[in-house]
């Protein structure tokens, strides 16, 4: 099968997939990442032909109770993380047809700087492992980066004009036709009034977004939606429905690499260690867009079926313990519920 082509270039030459992962209760199982890759095969096969960068963000401390968003894991979580990373590496190399290169990964080094440069400790060194053809890169920081710095570290190693940013617990549940989306982003790159630099995929909370309170309660956002929402037409003739998005979400999205680096990460002060983009830049961008400055961010939401088609499912990676454990917990709950019902009836 010949590679898919957009404007004379293969999709794999235009797009890099960035997957961020970190300690999770289901480790050392790779079920979360397997679910992501399976959803790619089922709903957007072209993603499996692209370059891929996997960032293994780590933890800050070990404690009695896990608080994964804060970088805190249990002793068991710390113990299983190294095996989890190895399992994910083997899975990705196999799924992207590079398993024969697993023993010959090229080692490299890098660093993620943040905060004021006068503070010498505001640097996190990281190790990189990559295949000889540079189609697959793994990043392993020595300290926790947080989602923001994890994405920036991957972006700096990206050589394609566009990226697909993928968190480890948001699989696709609907078909995504990738070529028209990339085509629209490429065509609109120089559009001063209606640029398309970022396209978020709809989760449950983003269904019917254009008519939601996130938009309708703000006159400026209502006006922007009325003027910008449209069906773009790719060179192939395929229609691409988009509505302006007034936020920069972390959930799976397509974006311009250059726009990401220049707009979200213009300096080392832009993102602190441990921070999420949507908690920082997301809020800042929304405040600016409420004042009418949407073009600066050029953020869109994919809007098929008039905003009613769900494209993502959240597996809740901070609490999900894997399919087997979930079934076990469900069985325990059902048994306890049956016992309580029986006692009430007595």
Image (cartoon, grey):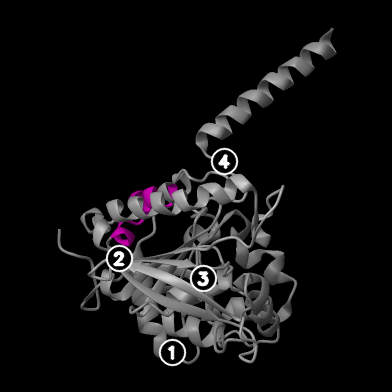
Q: Is residue 65 above or below residue 123?
A: above
Determine which residue is flagged by label 4. Answer: 321
Residue count near mark 3 (Cα–Cα under 10 Å), binned few <14, some 14–19, many ≥20: many
Residue count near mark 1 (Cα–Cα under 10 Å), binned few <14, some 14–19, many ≥20: few
Residue 47 among magenta residues: yes
Q: Residue 324: give x, y in percent of width and height.
A: 51, 32
Q: CA distance from mark 1 to mark 2?
A: 26 Å
Decide which of tag 2 and tag 4 comes sooner along the chain: 2
Residue count near mark 2 (Cα–Cα under 10 Å), binned few <14, some 14–19, many ≥20: many
Decide which of tag 4 and tag 3 comes sooner along the chain: 3
Q: CA distance from mark 4 to mark 3?
A: 23 Å
Q: Residue at x 33, y 78 (%)?
A: 160
Q: Nearer the viewer, mark 2 or mark 4?
A: 4
Determine which residue is flagged by label 1. Answer: 191
Q: Is residue 260 left or right of residue 339?
A: left
Q: Is residue 39 left or right of residue 65?
A: left
Q: CA distance from mark 3 to mark 2?
A: 19 Å
Which contiguous range is marked in magenta?
Answer: 35-48
Q: Residue 109: give x, y in percent of width and height.
A: 40, 76
Q: Nearer the viewer, mark 1 or mark 2?
A: 2
Q: Is residue 319 above or below residue 233?
A: above
Under circle 3, the secondary element is helix
Q: Residue 81: give x, y in percent of width and height.
A: 51, 51
Q: Residue 172: give x, y in percent of width and height.
A: 45, 53
Q: In terms of depth relative to the viewer, which is nearer, 153 or 327? A: 153
Determine which residue is flagged by label 2. Answer: 50
Q: In terms of depth relative to the viewer, which is nearer, 323 or 294? A: 323
Under circle 2, the secondary element is loop
Under circle 1, the secondary element is loop
Residues tagged 1 and 4 counted as in contact (Cβ below 8 A): no
Q: Residue at x 58, y 86 (%)?
A: 268
Residues tagged 3 and 1 counted as in contact (Cβ below 8 A): no
């Amino acid at each position: 099968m010949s590679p898919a082509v957009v404007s004379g270039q293969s999709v794999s030459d235009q797009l890099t997939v960035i997957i961020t992962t970190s300690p999770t209760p289901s480790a050392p199982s790779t079920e979360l990442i397997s679910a992501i890759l399976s959803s790619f095969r089922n709903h957007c096969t072209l993603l499996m032909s692209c370059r891929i960068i996997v960032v293994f963000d780590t933890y800050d401390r070990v404690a009695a109770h896990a608080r994964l968003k804060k970088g805190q894991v249990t002793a068991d979580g710390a113990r299983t993380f190294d095996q989890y990373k190895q399992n994910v590496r083997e899975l990705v190399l196999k799924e992207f047809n590079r398993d024969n290169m697993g023993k010959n990964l090229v080692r490299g080094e890098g660093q993620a700087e943040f905060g004021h440069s006068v503070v010498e400790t505001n640097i996190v060194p990281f190790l990189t492992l990559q295949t000889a053809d540079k189609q697959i890169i793994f990043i392993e920081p020595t300290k926790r980066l947080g989602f923001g710095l994890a994405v920036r570290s991957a972006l700096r190693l990206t050589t394609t004009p566009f990226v697909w940013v993928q968190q480890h617990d948001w699989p696709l549940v609907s078909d995504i036709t990738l070529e028209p989306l990339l085509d629209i982003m490429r065509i609109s790159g120089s559009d001063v009034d209606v640029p398309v630099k970022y396209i978020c995929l709809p989760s449950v909370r983003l269904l019917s977004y254009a008519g939601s309170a996130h938009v309708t309660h703000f006159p400026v956002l209502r006006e922007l939606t009325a003027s910008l929402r449209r069906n773009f037409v790719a060179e192939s003739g395929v229609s691409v429905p988009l509505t302006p998005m007034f936020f920069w979400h972390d959930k799976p999205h397509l974006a311009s690499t250059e726009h990401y680096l220049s707009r979200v990460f213009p300096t080392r002060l832009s993102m602190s260690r441990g921070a999420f983009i949507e908690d920082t830049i997301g809020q800042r961008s929304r405040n600016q867009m409420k004042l009418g400055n949407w073009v600066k961010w050029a953020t869109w939401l994919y809007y098929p079926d008039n905003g009613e088609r769900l494209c993502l499912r959240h597996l809740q990676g901070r609490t999900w313990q894997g399919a087997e454990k979930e079934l076990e917990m469900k069985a325990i709950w059902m048994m306890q519920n049956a016992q309580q019902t029986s006692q009430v009836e007595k």
